[in-house]
């Protein structure tokens, strides 16, 4: 059975900034006391809360164990100070049963043992550490617009340095657009290498295949700055991988934000800070600090 496992930090799932400010200003002891004092105060939903709710909804109507979609909670709290997080999970009815509390230590070493295909965090340093260890990871950033109200889970991806490696993007940045197009035409039948999100996209595709095609609750899109003639290599690479994307937008350098809004993305993954800034005006976004744009 296809399974999707997503690891997420507590600060991405819930709004924990009040306690974090206490920690920054007064230290660990004051923070621990603050969390114990407020452990029965329910935390407000955080950046990733709507996405997590939609992911867990994919388990509706099934009783399989383990579930087809599982969320793993990772936190640098201790289990004692994390009781407030557990209470909030229970309050919102989130089916999250597995968690790790590290008392200040890094959480990324626990992602692979859980078999997670994706790690989402509000901490860019944790995301970079995870990517450096071969884990698909993104810093999740909130949308500035209102949450989209459609029932499907809709996920959009950039291509180069996210789904694919960054070898073609390096040609573009180092030698210009004309050299990039010439390179892609020459190598059109040579598959692109896999990027950090290839495994997550494949797992998402396998999960899609478990649902009837005419009534699938998951929809995916490639939203790329590429245009013809650079589109052919992308299409043939995905064909060789055996991965189908529902929609492919070859924008030729146009701003991505309005197109992501038209698609209705619940989240968009991109390596470019510029594209993330454009996206966030319309949808939630995950910055992937990988490849030449982040060196």
Image: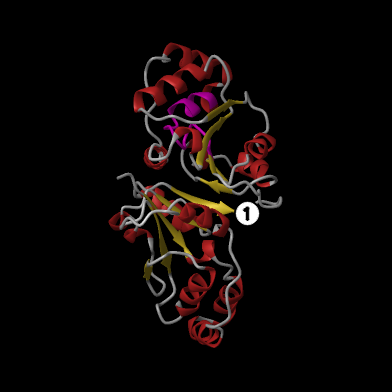
User: Quick one: quadrant of the N terminus?
Assistant: top left
Can you say whether 247 is above or below 179 in the image? below
Q: Which of the 4 image quarters holds residue 70?
A: bottom left
Toward the front, the furthest residue is 61
Residue 272 spot, x, y in % from top left: 57, 39
Q: Is residue 181 left or right of residue 202?
A: right
Q: Is residue 5 left or right of residue 42?
A: left
Pick whichever, 152 or 112, lies toward us.
152
Q: Is residue 228 left or right of residue 56?
A: right
Residue 105 spot, x, y in % from top left: 38, 69
Numbered range of the magenta stretch: 156-172
Element class at badge 1: loop
In magenta segment, residue 159: yes
Q: Which residue is mark 1?
A: 142
Q: Which residue is rendered at x = 38% and y = 63% of the image? A: 107
Residue 286 spot, x, y in % from top left: 54, 48
Pick whichever, 159 or 114, lies toward us.
114
Pick whichever, 94 or 78, lies toward us.
94
In magenta segment, residue 217: no
Q: Residues within 10 Å of mark 1 (few under 14, many from 20)?
A: many
Q: Which residue is rendered at x = 41% and y = 46% of the image? A: 136
Pick whichever, 106 or 205, lies toward us.
205
């Amino acid at each position: 059975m296809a399974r999707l496992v997503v690891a997420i930090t507590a600060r991405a799932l819930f709004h924990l900034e009040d306690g974090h400010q206490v920690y920054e200003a007064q230290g660990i002891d004051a923070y621990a006391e603050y969390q114990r004092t407020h452990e029965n105060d329910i935390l407000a939903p955080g950046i990733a809360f709507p996405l997590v709710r939609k992911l867990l909804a994919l388990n509706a109507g099934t009783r399989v164990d383990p579930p087809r979609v599982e969320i793993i909670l990772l936190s640098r709290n201790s289990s004692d100070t994390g009781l407030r997080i557990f209470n909030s999970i229970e309050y919102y009815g989130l089916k999250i049963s597995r968690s790790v509390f590290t008392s200040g230590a890094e959480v990324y070493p626990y992602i692979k043992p859980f078999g997670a295909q994706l790690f989402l965090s509000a901490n860019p340093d944790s995301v970079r550490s995870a990517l450096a260890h071969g884990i698909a990871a993104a810093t999740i950033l909130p949308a500035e617009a209102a949450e989209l109200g459609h029932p499907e889970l809709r996920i959009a991806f950039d291509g180069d340095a996210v789904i694919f490696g960054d070898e073609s993007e390096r040609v573009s940045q180092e030698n210009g657009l004309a050299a990039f197009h010439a390179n892609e035409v020459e190598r059109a039948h040579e598959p692109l290498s896999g990027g950090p999100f290839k495994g997550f996209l494949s797992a998402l595709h396998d999960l899609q295949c478990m649902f009837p095609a005419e009534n699938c609750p998951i929809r995916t899109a490639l939203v790329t700055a590429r245009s013809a003639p650079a589109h052919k290599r992308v299409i043939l690479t995905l064909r060789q991988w055996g991965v189908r994307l529902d929609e492919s937008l070859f924008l030729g350098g146009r701003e991505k934000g309005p197109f992501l809004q038209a698609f209705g993305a619940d989240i968009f993954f991109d390596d470019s800070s510029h594209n993330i800034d454009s996206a966030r005006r319309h949808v939630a976004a995950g910055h992937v600090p990988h490849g030449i744009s982040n060196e």
